C-alpha cells in the first residue's frame, strides 16, 4: 500500500499527519496486498486485537462475566459457528 505523508513543518522534516492513498479500482486494491476475509474471520481478528490491547471486549454487557462471556470467548478463539437461540414462548 502506498503511503503519503503531509509534513506540518517541512523545514524541520517533522511529519505531523499521515494519509493513506486509497485504491480507486480493483487492480489497485489487489496490488496493495489486500486479502478478502470472511465475516467470521474478521470478527475473530478484531476479538484477538481487542484482547491483546486489553480493551473492553463487550462494553455495555453486564452480569454475564462468569457465565455467557467465557463461552463466547472460547467459541471465538476456536472459530466455532455461533447461532442465536430462539426463545420459545
Image (cartoon, grey):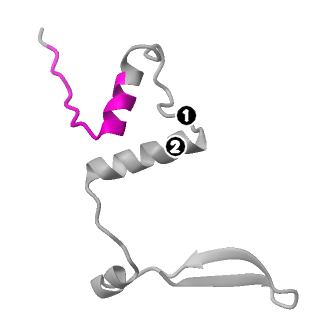
Q: Which residues are magenta?
A: 71-87
Closer to the camera, 14 or 70? 70
Closer to the camera, 18 or 33? 33
Dot 2: within a 10 Å radius of its alpha carbon, few (fewer than 14), some, or many (20 or more) residues? few
- Is disc 2 in contact with disc 1, using a CB cutoff of under 8 Å? yes
Q: Is residue 62 left or right of residue 36?
A: right
Give the residue at x 36% y 19%: 68
Q: Is residue 66 above or below residue 56?
A: above
Give the residue at x 43% y 42%: 47
- Where in the figure is residue 49, as x and y percent of width and height? 50, 48
Give the residue at x 51% y 84%: 2
Q: Which residue is mark 1?
A: 56
Closer to the camera, 42 or 87? 42
Q: Residue furthest front?
A: 78
- Disc 2 from disc 1: Cα separation: 7 Å
Q: Which mark is residue 35?
A: none
- Quadrant housing residue 30: bottom left
Give the residue at x 41% y 23%: 70
Find numbered disc 2 in the image and state the secondary structure of the residue it sits on: helix
Q: Which mark is residue 50?
A: 2
Q: Residue furthest left?
A: 88
Q: Is residue 73 magenta?
A: yes
- Where in the figure is residue 25, as x and y percent of width and height? 31, 85
- Where in the figure is residue 39, as x and y percent of width and height? 27, 51
Between disc 2 and disc 1, whose residue precedes? 2
Find numbered disc 1 in the image and state the secondary structure of the residue it sits on: loop
Q: Is residue 12 left or right of residue 54?
A: right
Amino acid at each position: 500500500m502506498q503511503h503519503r505523508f503531509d509534513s506540518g513543518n517541512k523545514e524541520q522534516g517533522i511529519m505531523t499527519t499521515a494519509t493513506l492513498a486509497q485504491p480507486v479500482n480493483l487492480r489497485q486494491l489487489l496490488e496493495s496486498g489486500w486479502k478478502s476475509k470472511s465475516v467470521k474471520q474478521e470478527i475473530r481478528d478484531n476479538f484477538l486485537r481487542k484482547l491483546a490491547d486489553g480493551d473492553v471486549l463487550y462494553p455495555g454487557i453486564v452480569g454475564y462475566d462468569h457465565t455467557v462471556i467465557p463461552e463466547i470467548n472460547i467459541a471465538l478463539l476456536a472459530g466455532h459457528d455461533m447461532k442465536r437461540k430462539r426463545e420459545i414462548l
